[in-house]
Image (cartoon, rainbow, N blue to C red):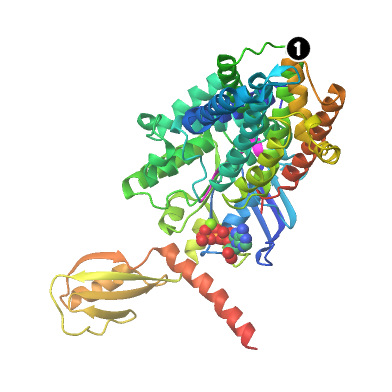
Amino acid sequence: MTQALTIRQLRKTYPNGLIALKGIDLDVAEGDFFALLGPNGAGKSTAIGIIASLTNKTSGSVRVFGHDLDTDQAAAKSCLGLVPQEFNFNMFEPVVEVVVNQAGYYGIPRALAFERAEQYLRELGLWDKRRVMARNLSGGMKRRLMIARALVHRPRLLILDEPTAGVDIEIRRSMWEYLRRINQQGTTIILTTHYLEEAESLCRNIAIIDDGEIIENTNMKVLLNKLHTETFVLDLREPIDAIPPLAGYRVHQVDPTTLEADISRECSLNGLFTELSRYGIEVLSMRNKSNRLEQLFLDLVDDKNSHRRKGAAE
Amino acid sequence: MTLGEKYTAFRTILIKEFLRFIRIWIQTVLPPVITTALYFVIFGNLIGSQIGDMEGYRYMDYIVPGLIMMAVITNSYANVVSSFYGSKFQRHIEEMLVSPIPNHLILSGFVAGGVARGLVVGSAVTATAFFFSDVQVHNLFVSISVVVLTSILFALAGLINGVFAKSFDDISIIPTFVLTPLTYLGGIFYTIEMLPEFWQGVSLANPILYMINAFRYGLLGVTDIDLYASYLIIIGFIAGLYWFALTLLNRGVGIRN
Ligand SMILES: Nc1ncnc2c1ncn2[C@@H]1O[C@H](COP(=O)(O)OP(=O)(O)OP(=O)(O)O)[C@@H](O)[C@H]1O
Ligand SMILES: [Mg+2]
C-alpha cells in the first residue's frame, strides 16, 4: 500500500528552546481519513507546519507520497493541500482572487484556475461571496474559503488543522459530508480537532499526541474497544427516593428522576433494564454521559500526566 | 515545476502585486504626482526663474530627471517593503511557502511588482513634467534602461527591508532616514560641480548620484558622472542585493520558524 505520509524521528526545538516535538513517527496510508488529536500545545500544528514547509524541522524526515521534503520538496508540496489553524489569506483580496492566486502558485493557468475556483467555491457555498473582500466573510465562511483554496490544485493529501473551529452545527455537518465525499473520491485526509465527536464520526485511524510525543496510534474501532466502562444517564418517569439494590450494577442517583449507571463491557444493558422493571422503575430516555472518545482521550492524557508527575516526584 | 508552470506562478505574483497597488491608487499613485507638481510650481517656476540656467538648461528642465527618479526610487522601494511585510504580518506569504514556487521566483515576482509601481508612478510623474517643462528625450534607450534598472535595485532593497522588518515602524525607518536624504543629496536640484571639492568627493560615495546623473544624461544629455561607471555601479548593486535577498529567503529568515 502506498504511504501518503511517512514521518520518522521528527524533532522540533523552537529558537526559544521549547521542545515541541520529541521525535515522532507517523504513517498515514493512501486513502485514509486520519485524526491527529491532542490537548492544546501538544505539537499538532508544529508537526503540520513542518509537513507543509512552513516551519523548519530540527531533525528527522518527512515524506509525502514518497517524496522526501529535503530532497524532493517541490514534488512533495504539489501533493499536499493545507488548511491551517489560523486565517492566513490576504484580508484585502476578493474571495475569488484568493483561490485563483493560490492555483497560480502551483502553476495552474489562469483560465483553468478560474474554472476550479468556481467549482470549489460553489461546492463550499461561497460562490455568491466571490467578489466580497475576504475580511468581510464570517468566521465560518473564512474556514470554508481556506478549504476551497487548499483544494484548488487537487492535492492527493489534504491536511486540515481544526477546520471546524468556530463553525456552526449545520455548516459543520455539511463540511463533514463534504470531507467524507472527497475522501471517498480518493483524497487522503488528516485532520486535527478538539471535537472528538468529529474525529469519531469521520476518521478510521487516529494518533494521539501529547507534549510532543505520540502516545497512541491505532485504528479508531480498536481504540474505542479499549474503553471498559461507559457511563449512561437515565431519565426516569417517576421520582424515586432511593435506589433499590441492583445486583451487579454500579448505579447512583443524581436527583429524584435521574440515575447514572456505569456499564462495563461484560454486563449488558438488558440486564439493567430487567432489574429496574422489577422495581417498577420506568426509564424515559437514556444517553451517554460523555462522548466515548472523549472519555478515552481524557484517560490517556491523564494516565500519561500522572506517570510524569510520579516520575518527577521520585 | 515545468517552465510553463513557473511562468504562470511568476505572472500570478506580478498580477497580484499590480492589483494591490492599483486598488489603493489614491495612496500609491496620486501622492507622488501631486508632490512633483508642487516641486515644479515652487522650485521650477517661482524660485527657478530667479536661479537662471544650470549646465545650460532652464532650472525647471534641469530638475525634471531627478524628480522622476525620486518618484521611481521611493515607489519601487515602498511597494515591495510594504507588500512583503504585509504578507508576513497577515501571514499570506504562507500561500507561497506551501506551494512549489522556487524562492528565486518569489523574489522576482515581488521585485517585478515593485518595478511595475515604479514605472506606473514614474510615467505619471513624467507626464506631469512634460506638462510643466519642455524637456525632450535625448537618448531613449539610456532613459528607459536606467529607470528600469534603478527600480529593480530599490525593489530588491525594499524586499530585504521587508524580510528584516518586525513592525510597521521598521518599514519606514530606512526610507525616512537613509533613502530620502541620499536622494536629496544625489543631485536632484544641483550639479555637484557647485560643491566644494571635499563635498564633491563625499557625494561620489552616494550611489543614487550615479542613477540620477545617468538618467539626466538620458533625458537632457548632461551628466556629472561617466555613464559606464553609472551602469556598472547600478548593475553591481543589483547583483549584490539579489544574492543577499535570495540567501535570506532560502534561509527562511523572518518567514519560517
Ligand atoms: N513560533 C513558536 N515559537 C516558540 N514556541 C512555539 C512556537 N509555535 C508554537 N510553539 C510552542 O510549541 C508547542 C506546541 O505548539 P503547537 O501550536 O504545535 O500546539 P497544538 O498541538 O497545535 O495546540 P492547539 O491545539 O492549541 O492548536 C507549544 O508549547 C507552543 O507554545
Ligand atoms: Mg494547533
Q: Is residue B110 placed above or below A297 in the rendered structure?
A: above
Left or right, residue B118 beside residue A90 = right
Left or right, residue A144 beside residue B169 = left
In which image quadrant can residue B46 be found? top right
Left or right, residue B167 beside residue B207 = left
The span picked out in magenta is A77-85
Q: What residue type is labelled 1?
A: Asn
Element class at badge 1:
loop
The structure residue drawn at horizontal position 60% and vertical position 44%, both measured from the top left corner, is: B85
The residue at the far left in this view is A238
Q: Is residue B12 placed above or below A238 in the rendered structure?
A: above
> Label 1, on which residue?
B139
Residue B49 is at least partly visible in this image:
yes
Give how far across and how far down residue A268 sits, in percent: 35, 69
The structure residue drawn at horizontal position 77% and vertical position 25%, both measured from the top left corner, is: B213
- Nearest the viewer among B201 and B197 is B197
- In the rendered view of the protein, which quadrant contains the N terminus of chain A? top right
Count neighbours of disc 1 (C-alpha within 10 A) and say few if under 14, some if 14 to 19, many if 20 or more. Answer: some
- In the rendered view of the protein, which quadrant contains the C terminus of chain A? bottom right
Give how far across and how far down residue B45 sits, in percent: 57, 22
In which image quadrant can residue A153 be found? top right
- Nearest the viewer among B48 and B85 is B48
Q: Is residue A57 magenta?
A: no
Q: Is residue B146 placed above or below A132 in the rendered structure?
A: above
The residue at the far front in this view is B50
In which image quadrant can residue A286 be found? bottom left
Q: Is residue A143 placed above or below A216 in the rendered structure?
A: above
Give how far across and how far down residue B8 sits, in percent: 64, 24
Q: Which chain carries label 1?
A: B
The structure residue drawn at horizontal position 33% and vertical position 79%, both measured from the top left corner, is: A249
Give how far across and how far down residue A55 sits, in percent: 66, 51
